[in-house]
Amino acid sequence: MMTMRRLCWLWIALLLLGTVAHAWDFDEEVYICGTLGMSMAELQSAGITLVSHISHTREWMAEAARYGIRGMPYVSLYKVYDASAPGADRQHPFWSAVEITGHPEWVYIGANGQKARPFNNEFYPKVNWQSCTNTAGLAEAYARGVAGVIRNGAGGVFIDNVLPAKVCHGPQFGVHQHLYPDKDNIHSFKIALGQVQETLKGFGPNTVMMLNVGDWTPWQEFGDCMMLESFIYNIDVRPGPGGWVGNEIIRVKTWPKILATLKATADHVAGKGNIVTLEYLPEDPEAAFYTYACAKLGDYHWSPGGRVWRDVARALYRCRLQTAKGPLLESQGIYFRHYAGGMVAVNSTGAAVSARLPAPPDCASLADVWDRQVLPVRDGHLDARLPADAGRIYIEPTRLAVGLLREASVSLRTAQEKSVTPNRPPDPGFERACAAAELALRASPDAMATAVATLLRALDAGLQGPSQGAGTRLATGPQIAPKEALDLLKAEHLPSALRLTVESDRVVL
């Protein structure tokens, strides 16, 4: 049997080999909707490669590229732009291309003969109107706008609101004429999407087009990935000043509806179609684990909304469960699915369940990401216990350990950055220790463990003020989640080959 050290070397070698050139596949990407307030270093620590809902500027794209991250600015073919409205951004490459000052015919006309705001919401920001894609020149304008975004260095675009109104009443009221008089807005919207897709892919096959859809079935031929927004959780909002008001988190799908969607999309995903779920989550980490596990049951990608704890998000992203290695299975009310080096499980019952589940091949043990306990695999099976209506993720212990060490390193770096003031420049000794830790991670998790201990000592030595220890310092302030820091280095959370001991905020090798 391989030793833990040999497994560590093998895992890192495979990780490095993954950089060999080959045909691009969206499944290789790790996506998040917005940054959740994380720094580039934190996003990189989580392994994230694609971020939407970010700045369109060249400066943002260049900084992200330093961390191996590509940006996907927000655009929408459901909307056109009024640059004369307060707050308009006349420099935006997309919105300036679909500006209506010279093209009032691009605005959608409702059944009452009036121009319509998006979602027919009178409070919606005044820069936007609903679009009529069945008018001359608008599809081409969308394509030009998207090209402008990509020329700024973006890796793709996030196309929101793929839910056009079926009928525009412009001709009925003599407001404008339609390009396709015998066709509805769904037809013309698809033509516009096709032109945008052709333009995007002209910049390279790995230029990403993600669609936020309602009903996913009509749009399968477009883009690289479809988003199912509010798959399980949503924010209960209503029209109000500023656009929408309300912040109550509600659950919108029970297990039967979740399972029905997983089954309905199975053929699409099996045919290399990609789906990502976006969840507006309550603060309970159990909700994040549940929604992540449900997404992975469908072989989907996953992204949290803005309320999830960032350390929880990074822990889930670092599991790197990218492509399922088997079908959706069920035993005793627990639904589960295998991935390379891990598996997910969801308890669909209303009570805690213990079950003996088939484990992924060649796994001698699996770590529960929830509590970081290492569970043995006996006779090819894992003895799992799940609370009622809960989701769990199990991965190889080495992968968990490397992720925890990476989290510790980025937390230390973030803490150091927070300590910098005009009168206190960055400590060069800490910078050298950070660089050594990053190099060590690429070489060996054992070396990384030693390097993290060195980082803690360097941080304590470099920070001024009351002597509190690195652990206390790391756990303060909104930029670093409480309960992390030294918890990441506690011995019971790491395989024996990687263990450190923490005593009174000090790391003992």
Image: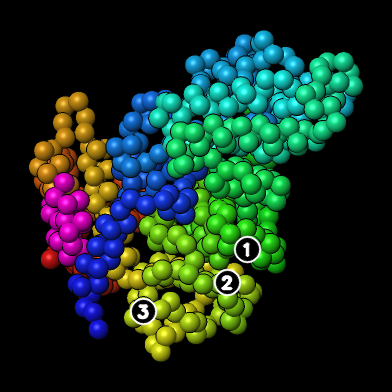
Left/right placement of residue 447 relative to residue 383 reads: left
Mark 2 or 1, which is nearer the eye? 1
Q: Where does the magenta region start and end?
A: 435-457
Which mark, residue 266? 1
Marks 2 and 1, how far apart at CA = 9 Å
Circle 3 — which element?
Answer: loop
Question: In terms of image quadrants, where is residue 349?
Answer: bottom right
Tell whether label 2 touches label 3 (CB within 8 Å).
Answer: no
Tag 2: residue type?
Answer: Leu
Coordinates of residue 364 in the picture (x, y in percent)? 34, 81
Query: Is residue 273 inside the magenta stretch?
Result: no
Give the image's coloring scheme.
Answer: rainbow
In reply to whether residue 456 is colored magenta, the answer given is yes
The secondary structure type at the circle numbered 1 is helix
Reading the chain from its start, which is encountered first: label 2 or label 1?
1
Residue reaching furthest to the bottom: 379
> From the image, which quarter does the N terminus lie in?
bottom left
Relative vertical location of residue 257 with respect to residue 351 in this rendering, above or below: above
Relative to 235, 462 lies left or right: left
Name the residue that disc number 3 marks: 362
Q: Which numbered disc flags the more N-terminal residue, 3 or 2?
A: 2
In the picture, the disc for residue 328 is: 2
